[in-house]
Amino acid sequence: MDLHQSTARKLTPGLLARGWRGCASVALVSILAATVAALPIEESGGPVNEASGDSSDEREPDERQTSETSNITPADAGDTAPASAPKPLTPEQMKLQSVLRGDLQPGDALVAIPEAWASRARMYAEPKTVAALDQMRRAAAADGITLTVLSAFRSFTHQRGIWERKWVERENNPAFAEPKARALDILRYSSMPGTSRHHWGTDIDLNSLNNGWFEYGEGKAVYEWLTENAADFGFCQVYSSREDGRRMRGYEPERWHWSYIPTAAPYLDAYEANPQLRPSGFMGAEVAEEIGWLTNYVSGINPDCRMPAMRAEPAPKPWLTQPAIAGALTSEGNVEDRQAMMSTSGQCLPDGWTKASLLTWKENDFALSDKAKAGDYALVLAGCLGDPDPAIRDGIAYEGLTRLLRDGRVNNEGLRELKTRLLKRLAPGAEDPQGFSRPFAALALSEVARTDRIAPWMSAEERLELVEAGAAYLEQVDDYRGFVDGEGWRHGVAHASDLMMQLALNPSLPDGANERMLVAIASKIAPRGGPAYVFDEPHRLARPIIYLTQNGYLDAGQLQSLFNALQDPAPLDSWGEAFKSEAALMRRHNLRAFASDLLISVSQSDNPVFDPIRSGAQGLLAVTG
């Protein structure tokens, strides 16, 4: 938008007629319409009664204090006020000024962001932003995406603390000797006090303050979900990439910074219509005009985040009823099989239970009003460990079960019944048409085994039964799928290895269990005809070997026998022939990944008990090199 147009524009109730519903409260829009064009702004210093904050971008204020430099209205200025001074600000004008400049107390116009949504307590945002964020978080969770708030409202004083810390840090750097150069460097990622969108309570930082985190793995999945779905809830990435040439000015791209546009747009209009809102009251404020604080920074946002480009009202998301697997129907694989999987989603739930109720329970941290029924709830969750919807299976059933068990809410009777049902799911020949039930039963049994390690309740016979069941399942795994888009995890090898790890950590492992576990683990380190592991299986297989050794369950002779067997190239005559066969190359890849992970795992320890692992892993790398 042309700057002359933006400064000439007045924010009027006509915005509502253009479909800007939900932008802000009607009262606030009316206030803006009446006052924004001629709002007198003082320049003598920062706002009054700021919440104090430390100098970290990630931390919010903990205490309140009065600003060192107070605003003085003309009515208070006495003899220093010019004869033509405007009238004192009305309460409505003072409120608007407070919003635009960050002179707010959290209780004035903001609400607390629930701690469960955030990286820490005492974060605030304006109410409509919090409500929209709640909807967006729930939708993301249904798709297996976790959104965590790192920063939200920041007052003028807090932003001044950030700015002045960075200003002082650069004072002795010759590259930033000139105030303009110093300001421009800080402005790459930090706003001048009084100009930050965080002052408005409409902008939030999510998950990571590092752009690189959003390029791989979990971060990439989070960013892709946000770019595809955030607009449906009114959020936009205001500081977007400049690669497409559509945003040429202002701050560096920030993949973490998302603004709730229905409320933020009127505030941006207010700023652009009032260039007299120039920054003041902090170190370096004198260069604000020279660096173009309004044109280049306040106005230098992603054009998609201008209100007309956003939807007037967020489109409803069918996240409560549509399985997350639905989006995978057009991806690789048999469409009919995927449709069949969808048709069975949620059938694990008892009458009266819904995916929506489960998601609500999860949002409330799996709280229970009647702790005596925790065992019954655990059994309901266990019944959904084979559900084809990853949001139910992994995001609710497994996560909820883990929470109940790790919090110690299930008594020994309930634990024993849970173990019995999970062992039936894991047993050879147990029904598992879609391949989720058995691997997730193994993973859940690892949590059951952990409870016995923390506070013993099993007999030696029960532990041995668990060892045998887990070892047999690991040996029999022939479904090597790890993660499949739209379907989520199966990961049988890794999940069975997790069960082996929890058992290996138990100081009361029964006689013979160590050898049984070692044989099962060895069978899957480099399975003949198996795939090249790419889903962290070597690491998960290495952990029980490490802990069995650490706890004295494996001696040097047993470890040497393991590495001798792994080094054997048979049926090849030598490892040099591996490069002539895809199957042999996959086996070589798996062996080297396993050996490398073992070496990394013990590299920081000088415990001599690990010497056989060091020598064996090094030998395995040498012969397969």
Image (cartoon, helix red, strand yellow):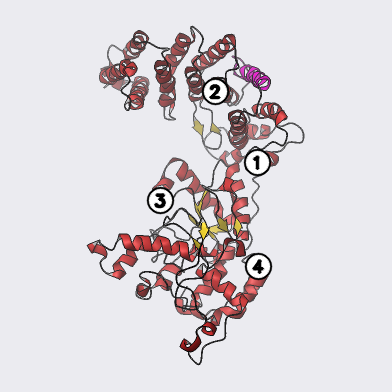
Q: Hey, what amino acid is under mark 4?
A: Ser
SS of the residue at dot 2?
Answer: helix
Residue 4 covered by magenta stretch: no
Badge 4: residue crowd in 10 Å (few <14, some 14–19, many ≥20)? few
Write down the region rendered in magenta: 412-431
For residue 521, the mark is none
Residue 570 percent across, percent down from the top left: 33, 11
Dominant secondary-structure state across the stretch colored magenta? helix
Residue 510 visible, this angle:
yes
Badge 1: residue crowd in 10 Å (few <14, some 14–19, many ≥20)? many
Residue at which label 3 appears = 211
Marks 2/1: CA distance? 29 Å
Badge 2: residue crowd in 10 Å (few <14, some 14–19, many ≥20)? few
User: Vertically, is 591 above or below 286?
Assistant: above
Residue 424 covered by magenta stretch: yes
Residue 208 percent across, percent down from the top left: 45, 48
Residue at which label 1 appears = 359
Q: CB atoms at circles 4 and 1 under 8 Å apart? A: no
Residue at which label 4 appears = 25
Q: Earlier in the sequence, mark 2 or mark 1?
A: 1
Q: Earlier in the sequence, mark 4 or mark 1?
A: 4
Marks 4/3: CA distance? 34 Å
Q: CB atoms at circles 4 and 2 under 8 Å apart? A: no
Q: Earlier in the sequence, mark 4 or mark 3?
A: 4
Q: Earlier in the sequence, mark 2 or mark 3?
A: 3
For residue 454, the mark is 2
SS of the residue at dot 3?
Answer: helix
Residue 350 or 246: which is nearer the viewer? Answer: 350
